[in-house]
Image: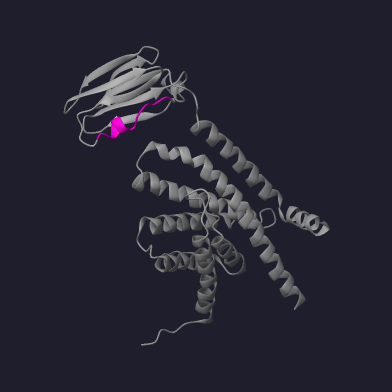
Amino acid sequence: MSNLLHRSKAIYQQLRIGDWLIITFSLAIIFLLFQTLWTTERATKVQVRLSDKIYGTYSLNQNRDISIQGVIGTSVISIAQGKVRFSKSPCHNQYCVHQGWLVRAGQAAICLPNQVSLELIGENKPYDSLNY
Amino acid sequence: MQIQTTQHDHQIAKLAALAIALHMIEAVIPSPIPGVKPGIANIVTLYVLYQFDFTTAAWVSILRVFASSLLLGQFLSPTFILSLSGALCSLVALGLAATLPKRLFSAVSLSVIAAFAHIAGQLLVVRLWLIPHAGVSYLIPLFAMAALFFGVVNGLIANAILQQTQNGKSSE
């Protein structure tokens, strides 16, 4: 037991001031990373894009289906109980449909063949201040 | 034809062999979280950086990546590319970190910096080449946490080994 104490003391003494600085700095960075990348904020709106233009922004409070005429056909986006999904798509791989329901702010689904994409937006978009 | 080898080459080979052995041990032990590995072979790189110089450390590290991938049958596979990009990034970071004053920064600092650079290089390759999707960013905090933890642990081990070598030298 005393050996263990002695060991941990030896480890403590090995660390120099720069080491502590680096460890503290890293912890701060990790904390920031968790805060920015693990947003559990529920989305309130969905922004739909058709090729490079914004097609429309819809609230998630209203249940509705949106049909969009894309490049190769009609994509259907469903909004229900604060969730969004691609419910129909003319593309052959159906990746967008298989992505399922999206809830969190920042989530996105893209249908490349039809050039339709949707992005969920929360109450406060992180880079909103830049738009001012 | 015979290649002339120097004493220094033999030393590099021996140290690289040690690093390869550690890499192999690590490859056998299953990791609780996929993609998270302690990277104990980097202790050797740190040791070499302190005992020899940066060039030797770079040789040992790159040799370890190539030889281990050949032994594991992963040469030129995505795993190998990830391993190489991680090693190259952490070498660059180590090269820069080695200029930090030794009085204030021990091997722990270098190990943590190298671990962060390693994971940054790997994630960059993953994001640009393997999984070009924003979902990768979700994993960054977890990997960063692992990098800090194993960086500190490896650094402490390197410190202990370096201290023992120093003691051995002074008692001789």
Q: For the point 38% across and 62% down, which residue is it?
A: B74
Snapshot quadrant of residue B2: bottom left
Color theme of the render: one colour
Q: Is residue B73 left or right of residue B32?
A: left
Q: Magenta stretch containing residue A98, yes or no? A: yes
In depth, the one of B109 and B39 nearer the eye is B39
Q: For the point 67% across and 65% down, which residue is it?
A: B162
Is any atom of residue B56 visible in this view? no
Give residue A82's position: percent from left, percent from top: 41, 18
- Chain part drawn in magenta: A94-103
Give residue A64's position: percent from left, percent from top: 31, 14
In depth, the one of A65 and B138 nearer the eye is A65
Snapshot quadrant of residue A101: top left
Quarter occupied by the C terminus of chain A: top left
Residue B62 lies, with reference to residue A92, above or below; the image says below
Q: Is residue B77 left or right of residue B59?
A: left
Q: Magenta stretch containing residue A51, yes or no? A: no
Give residue B163's position: percent from left, percent from top: 71, 65
Q: For the point 29% across and 30% down, which residue is it?
A: A97
Residue with the most extreme bottom position: B1
Is any atom of residue B10 visible in this view? yes
Quarter occupied by the N terminus of chain A: bottom right
